[in-house]
Image: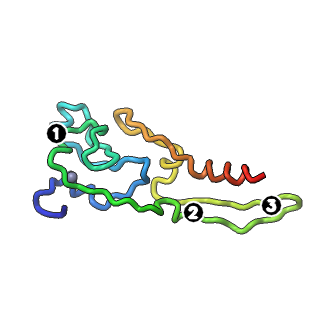
């Protein structure tokens, strides 16, 4: 909300960009560390995310999330086909912030899991399916 009521842990979350299947992180509040067993950081899928196990850090939160429908896809690059003998090779790649974690998944402290989207894997299967 950008006013003087926003607690510092939430101000620090402003502008964080993470792929949709991953969590953003904010500093934990002491009460959540002592009573909820969260570590120094709280990992959330979205504002007021109870799966983060935090309670104090969710109370009175007015944060919002903005979704970019293009996300990581806007960083996908496709190379030119390379013909060598009877083989044609095209390289499709993507390089972006947290792209590896988005592809294969990750585990956060406290065993909070983010499943991988395997979007590049699925793209290759789509091409392979056009036989
Ligand atoms: Zn907030």
112 relative position to 88: left or right: left
Residue at the disc numbered 1: 30
118 relative position to 65: left or right: right
The answer to which of marks 3 and 2 sits earlier in the sequence is 2
Residue contact between numbered discs 3 and 2, judged by CB atoms under 8 Å: no
* Of 7 and 124, the residue lying toward us: 124
The answer to which of marks 3 and 1 sits earlier in the sequence is 1
Q: Residue furthest right?
A: 85
SS category of the residue bearing label 3: strand
Q: Residue at x 38, y 39 (%)?
A: 108
Q: From the image, which quarter does the N terminus lie in? A: bottom left
Residue contact between numbered discs 1 and 2, judged by CB atoms under 8 Å: no
Q: Determine crowd level at label 3: few under 14, some 14-19, many 20+ residues with C-alpha closer than 10 A.
A: few
Residue at the disc numbered 2: 76
SS category of the residue bearing label 1: helix
Residue contact between numbered discs 3 and 1, judged by CB atoms under 8 Å: no
* Of 51 and 12, the residue lying toward us: 51
Q: Position of residue 109 (x, y in %)?
A: 36, 37
Q: Position of residue 25 (x, y in %)?
A: 31, 48
Q: Residue furthest front?
A: 130
Disc 3 within 8 angstroms of ligand 1 (CB): no
User: Could you tell me how far apart the alpha carbons at marks 3 and 2 are, in whole angstroms?
Assistant: 20 Å
User: Could you tell me how far apart the alpha carbons at marks 3 and 1 are, in whole angstroms?
Assistant: 58 Å
Q: Position of residue 65 (x, y in %)?
A: 31, 57
- The label number, if any, that marks residue 88 in the structure image: 3
Q: Position of residue 27 (x, y in %)?
A: 24, 47
User: Could you tell me how far apart the alpha carbons at marks 1 and 2 are, in whole angstroms?
Assistant: 41 Å
Q: Determine crowd level at label 1: few under 14, some 14-19, many 20+ residues with C-alpha closer than 10 A.
A: some
Q: Determine crowd level at label 2: few under 14, some 14-19, many 20+ residues with C-alpha closer than 10 A.
A: few
Q: Residue at x 25, y 46 (%)?
A: 48
Q: Residue at x 19, y 38 (%)?
A: 55
């Amino acid at each position: 909300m950008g006013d003087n009521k926003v607690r510092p842990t939430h101000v620090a979350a402003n502008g964080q960009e993470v792929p949709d299947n991953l969590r953003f992180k904010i500093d934990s509040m002491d009460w959540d560390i002592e009573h909820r067993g969260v570590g120094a950081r709280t990992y959330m899928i979205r504002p007021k995310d109870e799966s983060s196990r935090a309670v104090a850090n969710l109370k009175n939160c007015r944060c919002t999330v903005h979704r970019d429908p293009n996300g990581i896809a806007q960083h996908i690059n496709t190379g030119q086909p390379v013909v060598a003998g009877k083989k044609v090779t095209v390289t499709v790649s993507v390089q972006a912030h947290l792209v590896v974690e988005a592809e294969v998944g990750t585990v956060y402290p406290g065993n909070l899991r983010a499943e991988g989207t395997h979007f590049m894997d699925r793209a290759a299967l789509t091409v392979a399916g056009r036989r």
